[in-house]
Image (tube, rainbow, N blue to C red):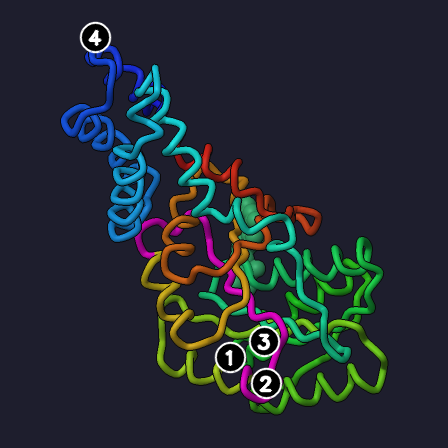
C-alpha cells in the first residue's frame, strides 16, 4: 500500500519538530515526497517539474513562512495548487458544453482507439437528451471498422437519440457533411461526430480528423483520454492538441483504480478544461469533472 501524501508529509513534519519555519532544506525534503507521490500517480515528468517549481515558489513566499504550522501550510499549498491546475479556478461553467451557435451545435470526438470515444458519445447523447432536452444526432466517420459504426448505432439507439448511418466506402469528410445536412433538415440541436482512432498516434489519422474539423467547424472538439494511460498521456495529448483546436477534455475510466495522473499531464499540455469524467461502461456513467476531487485522488 502506498502512503497517501498527507501521511508522507506528516512523517517529514515529525522530523522537523522544533523547526518553526519552512526553510530551503525542510521544504526540499517535503517537495521530494510530493514529487514521488505525483510520479506514482503516473503524472508525466515535465508536468511534475512545473508543479514542484510552482509550489516551491509559493511555499517560500510570505504566507507559508509566517504560518505557525509550516508543514500543514505546505500541504495546503500543494492541494490548492493541484486543484487549481485541475481547473478549480475556472469555475463550474468550464465543464459546460458550448451551444452558442446556429443549431446544430457540432461536437467532434477525438482520441486513440479504446479511449472510450464511442461510449462517451452514447453518454453525452443521453445527458443532452435527458438533462438538456436536446434533439441529438450521432454519426461515425470510422470507415475502417464497420464494428465501430455498429457500436455507435447500438449506444445511440439505447439512449433514444438519432443515428446517421455511414457507408465505409464514403470519405470521412463527406460522411460528416452529409450528417450535418441531415441534422439541419431535421432540426437536430446537436450533432455528435465520432471519429476513427488508432492504437497509437498516426499521421494519416491526424490528417483525417483535421480535415473533418475544417469541413464542419465544430463548436466543441473534445479530446477523450483514458485515465489509466499513464506516462503516455502527455505525448498523446500533445499530438491531438497540436493537430486540433481542442475545446475540452473527457477523462474516461475514472471508475478504475488509476490515480489519474493523466489528468495533470493533459492539463499541462493543453490548458483546456476537463469537462467530463467517464465513470463506468454503462451509458449513465458520465459526471461533470470535479477538479478538487481529482486533486485529492492524485495525491492519494
Ligand atoms: P473508442 O475506441 O475510443 O470508441 O472506445 P470505446 O468507447 O469502444 O471504449 C473502449 C472500452 O472502454 C469499452 O470496453 C468501453 O466499455 C470501455 N469504457 C469506456 N468508457 C469507460 C469508463 O468510463 N469506464 C470504464 N470502466 N470503461 C469504459
Vertical placement of residue 8 versus 189, above or below: above
- Left or right: 288, with 201 as reference point: right
Residue at the image point whose x is 56% and y is 63% from the top: 117
Q: In the rendered image, which quarter contains the N terminus?
A: top left
Residue at which label 2 appears: 168
**For the magenta stretch, what is the residue range?**
213-232
Local SS, label 1: loop
Residue at the image point whose x is 62% and y is 58% from the top: 119
In magenta segment, residue 218: yes
Q: Are marks 2 and 4 in contact (CB under 8 Å)?
A: no
The disc label shown at residue 144, or none: 1
- Left or right: 27, with 151 as reference point: left
In magenta segment, residue 182: no
Q: Nearer the viewer, residue 90 or 133?
A: 90
Question: Residue 151: x, y in percent?
Answer: 64, 65
Look at the numbered disc 3 and say if its residue's Cβ is closer than 8 Å to ligand 1: no
Q: Are marks 4 and 3 in contact (CB under 8 Å)?
A: no
Label 2 – label 1 distance at C-alpha: 7 Å
Q: Quadrant of residue 300?
A: top left
Residue at the top extreme?
18
The disc, 2 or 1, on the residue closer to the chain's N-terminal end is 1
Residue at which label 4 appears: 18
Locate ligand 1 by image quadrant. bottom right
Question: Residue 200: x, y in percent?
Answer: 36, 67
Q: Are marks 2 and 1 in contact (CB under 8 Å)?
A: yes
Local SS, label 2: loop
Question: Depth-wise, is mark 4 or mark 3 nearer the camera?
Answer: 4
Q: Quadrant of residue 242?
A: bottom left
Amino acid at each position: 500500500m502506498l502512503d497517501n501524501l498527507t501521511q508522507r508529509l506528516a512523517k517529514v513534519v515529525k522530523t522537523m519538530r522544533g523547526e518553526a519555519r519552512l526553510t530551503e532544506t525542510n521544504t526540499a525534503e517535503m517537495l521530494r515526497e510530493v514529487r514521488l507521490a505525483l510520479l506514482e500517480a503516473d503524472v508525466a515528468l515535465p508536468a511534475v517539474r512545473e508543479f514542484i517549481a510552482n509550489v516551491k515558489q509559493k511555499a517560500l513566499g510570505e504566507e507559508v513562512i509566517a504560518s505557525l504550522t509550516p508543514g500543514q501550510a505546505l500541504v495546503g499549498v500543494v492541494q490548492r495548487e493541484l486543484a487549481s491546475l485541475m481547473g478549480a479556478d475556472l469555475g463550474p461553467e468550464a465543464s459546460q458544453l458550448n451551444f452558442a451557435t446556429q443549431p446544430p451545435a457540432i461536437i467532434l470526438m477525438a482520441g486513440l482507439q479504446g479511449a472510450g470515444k464511442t461510449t462517451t458519445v452514447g453518454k453525452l447523447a443521453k445527458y443532452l437528451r435527458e438533462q438538456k432536452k436536446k434533439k441529438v444526432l450521432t454519426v461515425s466517420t470510422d470507415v475502417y471498422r464497420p464494428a465501430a459504426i455498429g457500436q455507435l448505432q447500438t449506444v445511440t439507439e439505447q439512449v433514444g437519440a438519432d443515428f446517421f448511418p455511414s457507408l465505409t466506402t464514403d470519405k470521412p469528410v463527406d460522411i460528416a457533411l452529409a450528417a450535418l445536412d441531415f441534422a439541419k433538415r431535421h432540426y437536430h440541436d446537436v450533432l455528435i461526430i465520432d471519429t476513427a482512432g488508432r492504437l497509437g498516434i498516426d499521421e494519416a489519422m491526424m490528417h483525417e480528423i483535421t480535415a473533418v474539423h475544417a469541413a464542419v467547424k465544430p463548436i466543441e472538439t473534445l479530446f477523450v483520454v483514458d485515465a489509466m494511460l499513464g506516462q503516455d498521456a502527455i505525448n498523446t495529448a500533445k499530438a491531438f492538441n497540436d493537430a486540433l483546436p481542442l475545446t475540452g477534455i473527457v477523462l474516461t475510466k475514472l471508475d478504475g483504480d488509476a490515480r489519474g495522473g493523466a489528468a495533470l499531464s493533459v492539463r499541462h499540455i493543453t490548458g483546456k478544461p476537463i469537462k467530463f469524467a467517464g465513470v463506468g461502461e454503462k451509458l449513465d456513467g458520465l459526471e461533470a469533472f470535479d477538479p478538487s476531487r481529482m486533486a485529492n485522488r492524485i495525491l492519494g
